[in-house]
């Protein structure tokens, strides 16, 4: 092996090792304080009392279950699990809100299309009366 | 040889590190690929798509117990991207539908306005027609009233004409009655004249035989002999024809009414008229002498009508 080939092989090895080390790095998870759970609990409560609860019942079920798990993790002092669950619950809330919004938009669009259809029929009736 | 072998070992090691046999991760990647390939979501949720892509790509560098959470969060980002895209797509659809609705509503307003104008025109036309119809009805009524007035006038006129005709008929009847009465009177007068003429008698006087004609043979205050007197002059002619050799003197007399000259002239003309009648009946002219005596020889008083009537006379004297 020539010195040049050796250098190239060493460079590839270094890159592979760096890639491996980056892959082993922990995922980005939110920071947990003593109040995080209570804030989360309030956020969940707000969602339950809104229209979102009716629009996204499945997400609400998951949120409720995960909140219980988060409570348990907090009680057990498992901050990492609490952080993951908190992040997931907030993500679920976000999805629930989006689902509610999409449902609302779908409903609005249906109504608007009905309105448009009725308006077209009415216009056709009017135009049929015109000479 | 050693170099190639070492390189191959290194590549296999790297592949072993990077290869992911997690099916859920593959499923997530395929789902992401399907999502971003959908044409209708292409313009939307670009930031969320990038975030999801980054999260999924990051999964390939993770392992161990944190991986499930990372997958969950990557799916969350994908779901969020989908929902954001769906949401923006729906919002866009809503905007477009609303724009179409606005256009339709504008066209509807125009059509309604046009129809309203047509209705207004039609209503105006109907009002005009009704007005014309009312005017026609008014004229017809006026004509009917005029006709009725005309009929009434004609009826009244007819009645007036009938009344006039009746009045005329009555007048004519009256005239006829009067004419008849006049005729009766004339006839009676003629008859009376005829009887008077027939009843004429001659009397002997110092001058000769004398027959006196009353003034009834003349028209009043005239020397004209009445036609009836002319027609019934037979009695006088019989009287004269009985004495063909005697001269005849005819004397006219009047009453004292009027002037003396007038009476003298009237008496002469009456005497001449009788002479003319005798000549016409065949008596020779030279046998006859006519003399007007006027009012000078009354035979009765002129103070009353009876006397005056006797004084108005023509004496026909057959001289001795």
Image (cartoon, coloured by chain):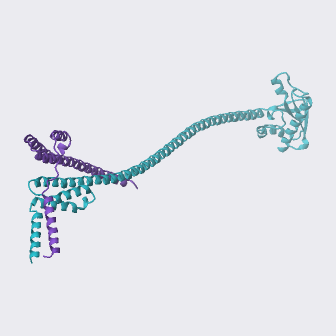
Chain colours: A purple, B cyan
Apparent side of residue B103 relative to residue A62 in the rendered image (left or right): right
Residue A56 position (above or below residue A24): above
Apparent side of residue B132 relative to residue B276 in the rendered image (left or right): left
Residue A111 appears in the rendering = yes
Residue B233, percent across and down? 79, 39
Residue nearest the viewer, comparing B263 with B66: B66
Residue nearest the viewer, comparing B279 with B72: B72
Residue A54, percent across and down? 17, 43
Specify the quadrant of the image occupied by residue A40.
top left
Residue nearest the viewer, comparing B206 with A66: A66
Residue A18, percent across and down? 15, 62
Apparent side of residue A115 relative to residue A2 in the rendered image (left or right): right
Residue B320 appears in the rendering = no
Task: Give the residue at the far top of this rendering.
Answer: B303
Task: Give the residue at the far front of this rendering.
Answer: A3
Specify the quadrant of the image occupied by residue B58.
bottom left
């Amino acid at each position: 092996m020539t010195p040049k080939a050796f250098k190239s092989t060493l460079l590839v090895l270094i890159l592979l090792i760096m890639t491996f080390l980056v892959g082993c790095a922990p995922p980005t998870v939110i920071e947990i304080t003593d109040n995080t759970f209570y804030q989360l609990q309030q956020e969940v409560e707000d969602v339950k009392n809104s229209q979102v609860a009716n629009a996204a019942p499945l997400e609400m079920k998951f949120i409720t279950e995960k909140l219980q798990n988060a409570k348990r993790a907090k009680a057990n002092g498992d901050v990492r699990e609490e952080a993951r669950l908190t992040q997931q619950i907030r993500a679920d809330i976000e999805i629930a809100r989006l689902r509610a919004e999409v449902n609302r938009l779908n409903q609005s669009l249906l109504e608007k299309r009905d309105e448009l259809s009725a308006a077209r029929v009415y216009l056709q009736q009017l135009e049929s009366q015109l000479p | 040889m050693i170099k190639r072998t070492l390189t191959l070992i290194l590549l296999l090691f790297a592949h072993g590190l990077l290869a992911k046999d997690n099916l859920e991760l593959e499923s997530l990647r395929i789902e992401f690929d399907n999502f971003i390939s959908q044409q209708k979501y292409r313009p939307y949720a670009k930031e969320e798509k990038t975030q999801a892509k980054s999260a999924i790509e990051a999964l390939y560098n993770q392992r161990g117990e944190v991986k499930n959470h990372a997958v969950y969060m990557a799916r969350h980002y994908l779901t969020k991207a989908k929902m954001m895209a769906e949401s923006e797509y729906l919002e866009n659809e809503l905007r477009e539908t609303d724009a179409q609705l606005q256009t339709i509503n504008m066209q509807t307003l125009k059509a309604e306005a046009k129809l309203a104008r047509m209705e207004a025109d039609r209503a105006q036309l109907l009002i005009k027609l009704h007005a014309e119809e009312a005017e026609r009805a008014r004229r017809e009524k006026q004509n009917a009233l005029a006709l009725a007035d005309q009929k009434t006038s004609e009826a009244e006129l007819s009645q007036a004409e009938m009344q006039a005709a009746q009045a005329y008929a009555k007048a004519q009847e009256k005239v006829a009655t009067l004419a008849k009465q006049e005729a009766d009177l004339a006839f009676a007068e003629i008859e009376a004249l005829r009887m008077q003429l027939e009843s004429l008698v001659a009397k002997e006087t110092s001058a000769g035989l004398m027959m006196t004609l009353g003034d009834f043979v003349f028209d009043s205050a005239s020397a004209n002999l009445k036609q009836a007197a002319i027609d019934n002059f037979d009695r006088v002619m019989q009287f004269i024809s009985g004495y063909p050799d005697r001269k005849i003197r005819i004397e006219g007399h009047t009453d004292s009414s009027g002037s003396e000259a007038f009476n003298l002239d009237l008496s002469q003309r009456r005497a001449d008229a009788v002479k003319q009648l005798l000549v016409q009946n065949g008596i020779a002219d030279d046998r006859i002498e006519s003399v007007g005596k006027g009012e000078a020889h009354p035979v009765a008083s002129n103070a009353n009508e009876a006397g005056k009537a006797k004084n108005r006379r023509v004496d026909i004297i057959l001289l001795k």
